[in-house]
Amino acid sequence: PLFFLFGRLAILDVPITLCVTLATVSLYRARDHGGRRWQVIAGLAMAAGVLVKGVIAILFPVGILTASALVERDRAGWRRAVGPLPMALALLLPLPWFCLMAQRVPGFLHFFFVEQHFLRYAAGGKIGQHHRPGVLAAVLFGGALPWSLVLAAGLAREGTAAWRTPDRRADRFLDLWLVAVLGFFSLSSVQLATYICPAFVPLALRAGRFWSEGRGRGWPILVWAALAALVLAAAAAPGHVYETLVGNGLYPRWWHQAQVARVALIPAASIVLGTTLLAAKVPRPGMALALLAGGLALGLVRTERARSAYRSYASLGTIARLRSGEADRLVTYGTYLQGFPFYARRRTVVVDSLGELRFGASFPEGRALMWSETQLIQAWNGRRRLLLVIDPVVWRRLRHQLTRPPTVLALEHRRVLVTNAPLGLRPPPAAHPHSP
């Protein structure tokens, strides 16, 4: 379910998962079967991953293969896979782009490699969980249900003795893959749930192996049915019961989304519960798997009905696009709203935003798109029409400094869209404070 959610987001963790998976599998094939073809594929995948999200595209495939070689005591296999060819492709193909960026954007290499790689890992950042071991493991286990239950049941029945047998070489590789991704990011000073995307692949492969061998059925299906029944009971319960069970465990700002999701959870949980109970009675593993996966897929589709409750700012962006002219300025105050420029189809100026955007503010084009609060006030009081997206609390503090009377255009997800002039009108000249 969590990977389905990540697939709905405009994030780089999903494409980097593709690159890491392709490179890791190719190196594994090169280790066991040799051949330059797999080395070339691995090198190209790592090079693409470096351009997508940096050096983890090399670190994970090479690190996983190295750990596997140590466990298997297979130095010759490691040499067959990690030779000069894949490493040269991985390092040299992205090089022209980084050289070009270093020429055009002074300081980019320090920002990208030092700040966004080393310092972010070692010192943390403004978002994510900080120094909380076990958080990502819990997210992976919960986000991969019910397949994480299948994996747990299979591992418990397998035992350490069977795990070390020669015919389990591929299984050991997948386990090292999962542990490497989870362990690496669990040691990071800042942890985001999306970081675990590359770990879903080995988990799915291992769970599929256990299911096909008949070692992942039984209590995992019953637990999954019980969880679906619990969600159904909580969603169908009276309002105060739902608020007690769900609301107390959420941030207050998420309560609206939880209320909207409640309507979608009732049919979704009913579908999952029904198909899971049917899967428990079907003797054939393939049919049971189809019922289990199909029910989960249909349930996730039903939850799409609650999508409008989550912040995308489609309405604000659409209204801004329809109500603004070519020469008008679009401005957002505070956190950069990624969905707003997409729906507005315009670049937006950002005021007092933190994080990575600060780096761009040190360049001429970036300075034009990164304002201080003083610049916002001057622009609002000027002769150019301006549309501003701002938190109502901040707006109440700021509006007494603005001489142009505001016009409220829309409100969505605790953001209000205001303008200093209605459509088709230019702001009038500001009255002098001492004029009668």
Image (cartoon, rainbow, N blue to C red):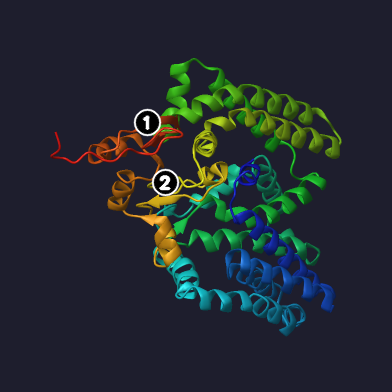
Instruction: Give the residue drawn at x 57%, y 45%.
Output: 345
In front here: 48 or 129? 48
Residue 229 at x, y = what percent? Answer: 62, 24
> Label for residue 331?
2
In front here: 238 or 212? 238
Residue most extreme to the bottom: 84
* Kind of residue indicated by mark 2: Val
Instruction: Give the residue drawn at x 75%, y 39%.
Output: 217
Tell me the quarter of the picture where residue 16 sits.
Answer: bottom right
The residue beneath circle 1 is 407
Left or right, residue 171 beside residue 197: right
Left or right, residue 61 beside residue 377: right
In front here: 243 or 194? 194
Instruction: Give the residue drawn at x 72%, y 81%.
Output: 75
Residue 124 in view, yes or no: no
Residue 384 at x, y = what percent? Answer: 38, 45
Residue 186 at x, y = what percent? Answer: 50, 59
Residue density around tag 1, few if under 14, some if 14–19, many if 20 or more, within 10 Å: some
Instruction: Give the residue drawn at x 44%, y 47%.
Output: 329
| Image depth: mark 2 or mark 1 in front | 1
